[in-house]
Image (tube, rainbow, N blue to C red):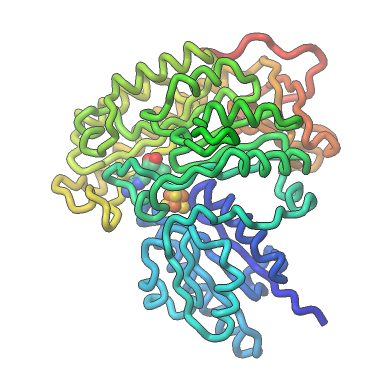
Amino acid sequence: MTDKRTVFVKTYGCQMNVYDSDRMTDALVPAGYVPTDSLETADLVLLNTCHIREKAAEKVYSELGRIRLIKEARAREGREMTVGVAGCVAQAEGREIAARAPVVDLVVGPQTYHRLPEFLDRARKGERVVETELATEEKFEHLPAPSRERTLARGVTAFLTVQEGCDKFCSFCVVPYTRGTEISRPVARVVQEAERLASAGVREVTLLGQNVNAYHGEGPDGASWNLARLVARLAEIPGLDRLRYTTSHPRDMDDDLIAAHRDLPQLMPYLHLPVQSGSDRILAAMNRRHTAAGYLRLIERIRAARPDIALSGDFIVGFPGETDADFEETLTLVREVGYLSAFTFKYSPRPGTPAAGRDGQVPEAVKTERLDRLQALVNEQTRAFNARTVGLTIPVLIEKPGRRPGQLSGRSPWLQAVHIDGDPARIGEIADITITAVGTNSLAGRFASGAPSRTGIAS
Ligand code: 5AD
Ligand code: SF4
């Protein structure tokens, strides 16, 4: 007889939640939990939630409705199931969740996950636990490292949170309230975690932060290190051949970081740099604290440093007060930049944020129309970018088996998915691949015989 309990974690939202979900599992394994892929049979179900837009938050309540039925059916069989809500909805709504969804035993905010085993003991004794304290620098610093097997089972690419929270207070955004003020992990902790990942076979690490380029962690010399310095240190780790970071704010894109894109071959030529709108009036109302022209100048400097860099962005359409003319300026900016990809969203008023109560809320039909037009433009740019890669031979990190038998799936330096026929033994390799065709969301290629192309795909 074993007293191991199974845990199922469902992740919503951003990459930081993906990272947090893995760390929650890491915190629970020493307490006797085993990860499972089956919600139906799990002893513990954790929903790691997202509060960024209304739709994301509502999904949690519909999932809790479904879980209630499963929990009730299991109770009839005399088996218990513990249900926890974690993440940003937990942080933002706390006790409201417990009140609205009686199925929930436990509500835990993103800064308290290291204490999960203790909360679960309390929940299993019948207490309804709600823990949403903000800003602990402790969070993941005392977790035992996951095993090499568990790390590799997660793949040859990994996320690593280096910074959390945001001090920017864009007027649409809940993050400063759900994730708290900016906290950077000390350099030594980040290096230790990156070394562990590399020694387990991870080849590519994406550094995460809500505002990652504002990173200012304490260095081993006691000084504050910026992201460029941290990246340069991580580039020294043998085996870590690819580094990325996300998400960045234009205001924090400093000279050192731009230079790092020129100087560090490990730093991949891809940058997610949200601008949200191309209208100065809307940018001001969003409290972005930069102009469209300022953003374009920045892009120019980044491209001068790394001509083949691929850019991606986030855009909100239908922000309060956005006119047709403002929206046209967004389209103009997108045309001027030429993105590889962009995430486009309809403005969603979030309770507690300054913009939510403003006059000039834009009708849903107008938002839909603008979103469609913007998305069509972005899709055109994605297709054009992808088409320019056909015929090139580029280094691709082979990540996992593809959908078809005999197929492998990897990523280009520009983060495009690439499908190749080949032997699964090649997973983990960075191989020279000649791109032969473009699909809707991916590229097709074959293992190259010759040397890689020397030219990038600078536009
Ligand atoms: N409505 C719509 N989109 C939003 N985002 C953040 N808050 C909102 C909101 N209230 C988008 C922004 C941000 C991305 C993570 O989500 O574009 O960059
Ligand atoms: Fe969602 Fe934003 Fe929280 Fe990430 S930080 S989980 S995107 S609300």
Position of residue 107 measured from the top left corner of the image (x, y, whole percent): 47, 70
- Residue 324 coordinates in the image, percent (x, y): 20, 32
Q: Is residue 208 left or right of residue 28?
A: left
- Comparing 350 with 421, the one in front is 350
In which quadrant of the rendered view does residue 264 lie?
top right
Q: Position of residue 326 (x, y in %)?
A: 22, 30
Judging depth in this view, the residue of 53 and 117 nearest the camera is 117
Image quadrant where residue 457 sits: top right
Up/down of 119 relative to 325, above or below: below
**In this rendering, is residue 276 above or below 449?**
below
Q: Is residue 269 left or right of residue 238?
A: left
- Residue beneath the point at 44% across and 62% down: 59
Image quarter where the N terminus lies is: bottom right
- Furthest-left residue in view? 359
Position of 397 with respect to 383 (left or right) is: right
Q: Nearer the viewer, residue 418 or 397?
A: 397
Residue 456, picture quadrant? top right
Q: List x then y, in percent, for residue 152.
A: 76, 47
The residue located at (55%, 62%) in the rendering is: 113
**Viewer-proximal residue among 239 and 361:** 239
